[in-house]
Amino acid sequence: MLSEREKERITEEALLHEYPRAAVSEALLIVQESRGWVPDEAIVEVAGLLGMSTEEVEAVATFYELIFRKPVGRHVILVCDSVSCWITGEEAILSHLQRRLGIGLGGTTPDGEFTLLPAGCLGACDAGPAMMIDGKLYDTLTPERADGILAEYGMGADAQTSHG
Amino acid sequence: MLKPLTADIRPDRAALPLAAYESAGGYQGLRKAIAQTPFQVQQAVTASGLRGRGGAGFPTGMKWSFVPLSGGSAGGAGADSSGHRYLIVNADEKEPGTMKDRWLMEGNPHQLLEGALIAAWAVQADIAYIFLRREYTRCAESLTRAIAEAQKAGYVGERVLGSEWNIALRMHMSAGRYMCGEESGLLNALEGRRATPRNKPPFPQVSGLWGRPTVVNNVETLCNVPHILREGAEWYKALSPGSDPGTKIYGVSGKLNRPGLWELPMGTTARQLIDLAGGMRDGLRLRGLLPGGASTDFLSAEQLDVKLDFDSVARAGSRLGTGTMIVLDDHTCPVGMVLSLEKFFARESCGFCTPCREGLPWVARTLEALEQGKGESSDLDILQQHVGLLAPGRTFCALAPGAVEPLGSALRLFREDFEAHVHQKRCPWK
């Protein structure tokens, strides 16, 4: 199932290290880059390319927060729920996002646009609450500011569920 | 007051380019190091008294000295010169409440590279890794650019600065797990395995990455090293008035007027930091604080004059940890705060050893029950019991012992708040 380009990139990555298996998390992220997640068939093929067993690759794939073994939305929202953000109002932000998107933690909107996940510390402890969308950090969040940010990602006022 | 690590970092944290870093004295420390033997460089860092800034405070020079050097003055028995040796930068900053390494990497990436290169020279490494968490996207950009600049300038690569020494520098972007910050878990991650901890001994300095001698150092630790080489151990010691030398990147988070990060002499007090942070917000009262990230014991409101250096904080019953404090105010529920901490630790437990895998979720669920008004008096005993069951020596690595430090101290300092949850059958803050 892997494209020639994906195989090529994984093989190149493996050559950068003393042993090919060192490239396994990077290989899974290469797969994820174009597909959004890592399907079972890709696990088998990555194992073959790196000389690992399928189980070894699966053990790594299921260990990391940012390797997805299920499909996710086009945009992945990581909401920081660690202690400094909790003190400064993370719960209010999270429940606001859940209402606006109509999904719970781990959920994806029916239109496939957004997935909502928790994150343990984004390193913005002095500017909480914080979240990250597609690698971009947003801090000092308020519900209003969160709405404005969602709009930047194409979430219209009429989209999804409104305030209940 | 000297701020060697951060004086050149711009307020917007735009990465300091190579030319600006060099004109501020950058890479002079590396030049000095390469003119000396690795053993001499180790001695210089040992003499400075630098202690690791990742949380444990282990003396950096001593950590390096456990690597068997080939030949040379300190080359001990068993030293071998064939095969690779590794220097690894632990940039997997994921301790809740800690945000200091991000500042250093975004604002002054070359300072970290120079520190890593000097450390690599000191342990005769030929390969260095920067193990960076993927969420730190701005750090990745600034470091990637800096590595390219350093390669072009001859600081990284083959025959560094005209010497016989070759050093390869690689970035590893980790896909996110707290356990990767533990050095033996990090090594497993780099080998393409689950980041579970390894048995010690053997220590990584003898048998680390791929079974080869390896040193793992924290970002802030390494950022001190160029300055020590450039200015000398005596200068470094004079940066702090106390016995613990150098400066520290301190942080303050919580409901304060101006939370943030400051580079200050080692041994600055919590009270001074809270003043710098503009005091408590909206007339709130401070009830306690975690001095160095999520896995440290609470200090009470009566302990604000404790000097925040390794030994003083230990004497006060906690740990300096990462030096980034988290403040609890009187409008925030202490039980809820500890629940937030323990949910994090329960989620991050790698599952490798039973006490941590089973104990931390039990702790988190018990706290959750208290918060929901479903707690009983015996739950406080269960929590207290876990403080002992997950103490150092009971688990495979330091994750669970760290996790119960805030729990044990909270049960002591905020006992009446835990009891109020039981008696009122609700969280009094909700």
Image (cartoon, helix red, strand yellow):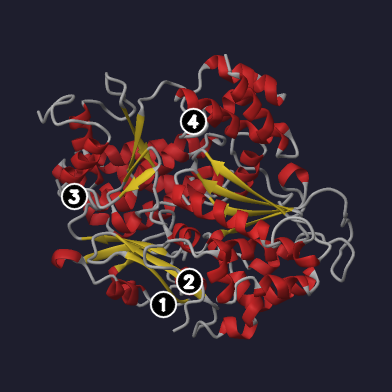
Residue farthest to the left, as pictured: A164
What residue is shown with label 4? A67
Please, which chain is the residue tagged with disc 2 on?
Answer: B
Residue B39 can be seen, yes or no: yes
For residue B268, the mark is 1
Q: Are marks 1 and 2 on the same chain?
A: yes
Q: Does the CB distance between marks 1 and 4 fall below 8 Å?
A: no
Query: Label 2 belongs to which residue?
Result: B248
Report the Cα–Cα distance between label 3 and label 1.
Answer: 35 Å
Residue type highlighted by circle 1: Thr
- Bin the neighbour count of mark 1 within 10 Å (Cα to Cα): few under 14, some 14-19, many 20 and up: many
Residue B420 tag number: 3
Q: Nearer the viewer, mark 1 or mark 2?
A: 2
Query: Which quadrant of the rendered structure holds the C terminus of chain A?
Result: top left
Q: Camera-side residue: B304 or B262?
A: B262
Proximity of marks 1 and 2: CB atoms separated by less than 8 Å: yes
Structural distance between the alpha carbons of marks 1 and 2: 9 Å
- Image point (64%, 67%), residue name: B60
Expressed as whole percent of the image width and height from the top left, the position of residue A121 reads 39, 47
The answer for which chain carries disc 3 is B
Instruction: Please report the residue visible at 58 percent of the width from the left and 30 percent of the height from the top.
Output: A60
- Name the chain under label 1: B
Q: Secondary structure at mark 4?
A: loop
> Where residue B119 sits in the image (x, y, percent)?
69, 64
